[in-house]
Amino acid sequence: MAEAENTSPLLIKRYASRRLYNTETSDYVTLDDIAAFIRAGRQVRIIDLKSGDDLTRQYLLQIIAEHEGRGESVLPIEVLIDLVRSYTTQAQSVVPQFLAASFEMLREGQSKMMENLSTFPNPMSSMPGFEALRRQQQLFLKAISPGWPGGSSGPEMDEDNGEASDKSQEESEDMAEIRRQLAELQKRISRL
């Protein structure tokens, strides 16, 4: 049943008061809730109750803007500038297809890399430090792609007591370090 729910988009209705209503659970939701649904792999469709207009794009852009505004930067300044420029040039017609194809290639590449990292015997596995490198690469891929195949949607839970496991705590610390390193790299790239 849960699989059937994930194939159909989650319908969110926006009322005149601008409140967002989840039609599956019959309760109000926030932008953070919608972002969590998307990270969990759900398709979401947001419509205006009165006019029937599809507002999904508007709200997705708002979610991205809020994350970027909180310092959770994913989009380098150069990319944002190029996106703004694409609205005023002939490139506008090819940019959406290019971005969609690029993200599809990223998802496919991530899946293949995760498969390759988990395939043993690997000739590099005898190298000193290979396991640590492999684990760091997996954490990096999970950090950049929560909700994607092979990505992480949250901490692993210990089934015995319902708490986050020591392993997920260690991974969280590793992911925080990876995020810090990514932010540093983005700053360096921006300066170039």
Image: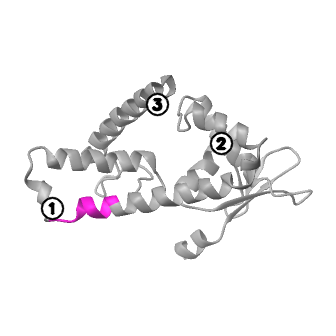
* Residue 16 in picture, x, y percent from top left: 89, 47
Apparent side of residue 183 relative to residue 84 in the rendered image (left or right): left
* Total numbered labels placed on residues in the image: 3
Q: Are marks 3 and 1 in contact (CB under 8 Å)?
A: no
Report the residue marked by disc 3. Answer: 186
Report the residue marked by disc 1. Answer: 122
Apparent side of residue 114 relative to residue 71 in the rendered image (left or right): left
| Mark whose residue sits in front, 1 or 2 | 1
Residue 83 visible (yes or no): yes
Viewer-nearest residue: 95 or 161 = 95
Q: Residue at x 69, y 55 (%)?
A: 94
Q: CA distance from mark 3 to mark 2?
A: 21 Å
Residue span colored magenta: 113-120
Report the residue marked by disc 2. Answer: 63
* Residue 190 in picture, x, y percent from top left: 51, 27
Residue farthest front in this picture: 90
Q: Residues within 10 Å of mark 1 (few under 14, many from 20)?
A: few
Q: Secondary structure at mark 1?
A: loop
Q: Amino acid at mark 1?
A: Asn
* Residue 120 in picture, x, y percent from top left: 16, 65
Q: Secondary structure at mark 3?
A: helix
Is residue 37 one of those drawn in magenta?
A: no
Q: Residue at x 24, y 48 (%)?
A: 135
Report the quarter where the N terminus lies.
bottom right
Residue farthest top in this picture: 191
Q: Amino acid at mark 2?
A: Ile
* Residue 115 in picture, x, y percent from top left: 30, 64
Q: Residues within 10 Å of mark 2 (few under 14, many from 20)?
A: some
Q: Earlier along the polypeptide chain: callout 1 or callout 2?
A: 2
Residue 148 visible (yes or no): no
Q: Residues within 10 Å of mark 3 (few under 14, many from 20)?
A: some
